[in-house]
Amino acid sequence: MDMTFQLSLSNLQTWHVVDLTQPLRSTIPIWPGDPSFSIQPWASYTKDGYFINQISIGEHSGTHWATPNTFIKGATSADAVPVEKMIAPSVVIDIRDQAVQNPDYQLSVADVEAWEQVNGRVPSGSIVILFTGWQDKWNHPTAFFNQDTQGVMHFPGFGVEAVGFLISQRQIVGLGTDTHGADPGSDGECAASRVMYAANGTILECLGGLDQLPAVGATLVIGGLSIEGGSGSPARIFAFMPPTDTQK
C-alpha cells in the first residue's frame, strides 16, 4: 500500500469527511430474492423507559461490503478480514456519461488507462470505485435495478478484463460501486466479482456521496459487523480527505 494514504490521528480533525452510506429505510432497493429489510419498534419510552428497534437485514443489503466466501467456499469471511484491510486509499473512476448512453456499460482497460493519463497511476493497495450515477436512483428501486420484461437487470459495472488488469498490474485490493453489484446487471455469472474474490479482495456496493470524492487522494474507513462465517455486512463507510494547502 502507498503509505502516503495512511491516516494520522494527530491531524485527523483537519481532514474533510464524506459519508458514503445510503440511508436504510423500509423502501430500500433489495436484490431480487434477498431477505427483505424490516425495522420494527421493540421498546418504547412510555412502556419500557427506553427506545430500541428490532431490525432484520441481509448481509448484502443497503450500503455493504462483501467477502470472498460469497462465491468461494472456505474463502475469507466477514469476521476474518484483517482490520488493516478496512482502511484503504480510494480511486474513483467516473463513467456517468457512458452509463447514460448505455446502462450495460462495462469499465474497460482502456478506460483505466485514460483515467491514468489524467490522474496518474492507480496506487497499489487501492479500492477502485466506479461512479456510475446510480446513487441518484437509490430512492427509486425500479429504476435502480432497471429490469427488462425478461427480468434481466441493466446497470453498469466492471468489465472482467479491467478487474484482472487492476489486480495483476496495479495490485488493487477491492472494488466499489454505487450500484447493487460490481458486475454489470446483465451479467448473471458475476465474472468481475469472482475475479476480485479469487484475489481475496473485498467489494463495496450501494455507495452514495461519490460526487463529493476526488478521483484520487481520499482514504476509506469501512465499518460493519464482524459476522462469524458471514459473507459481508451492512456498513457505514467514510472517506477522509486531507486538507488543501490553504486549509493547513
Image (cartoon, grey):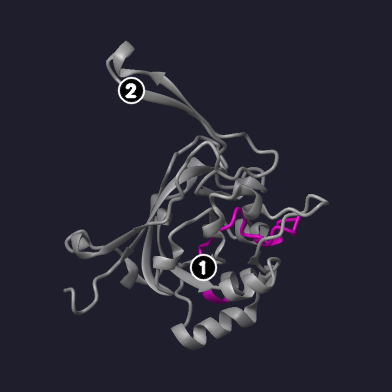
Q: If you read the primary sequence from the N terminus, does the residue marked by circle 1 or circle 2 appear first?
A: 2
Q: Residue at x 60, y 53 (%)?
A: 180
Is label 2 in a helix, a strand or a loop? Answer: loop
Q: Residue at x 54, y 34 (%)?
A: 57
Q: Position of residue 94 (x, y in %)?
A: 53, 73
How dense is the environment of label 2, judged by Cα within 10 Å: few (below 14), some, or many (20 and up)?
Answer: few
Q: Is residue 62 magenta?
A: no
Say the numbered circle drawn on residue 51: 2
Q: Nearer the viewer, residue 210 or 118?
A: 210
Q: Nearer the viewer, residue 199 or 87?
A: 87
User: Tags 1 and 2 in contact by the CB under 8 Å rule?
Assistant: no
Q: Amino acid at mark 1?
A: Ile
Which is the main secondary structure of the residues drawn in magenta?
loop
Snapshot quadrant of residue 189: bottom right
Q: Amino acid at mark 2?
A: Phe
User: In the rendered structure, which segment of residues is drawn in magenta?
Assistant: 169-192
Q: Residue at x 45, y 64 (%)?
A: 210
Q: Nearer the viewer, residue 40 or 61?
A: 40
Q: Residue at x 83, y 51 (%)?
A: 150
Left or right position of 96 against 152:
left
Is label 1 in a helix, a strand or a loop? Answer: loop
Residue 201 in sight in this render: no
Q: Which residue is mark 1?
A: 172
Residue 20 in sight in this render: yes
Q: Position of residue 177 (x, y in %)?
A: 54, 60
Q: Quadrant of the C terminus?
A: bottom left
Q: Position of residue 71 (x, y in %)?
A: 67, 48
Task: Give the spatial CA distance, label 1 vs label 2.
Answer: 43 Å
Please say if 34 is above or below 153: above
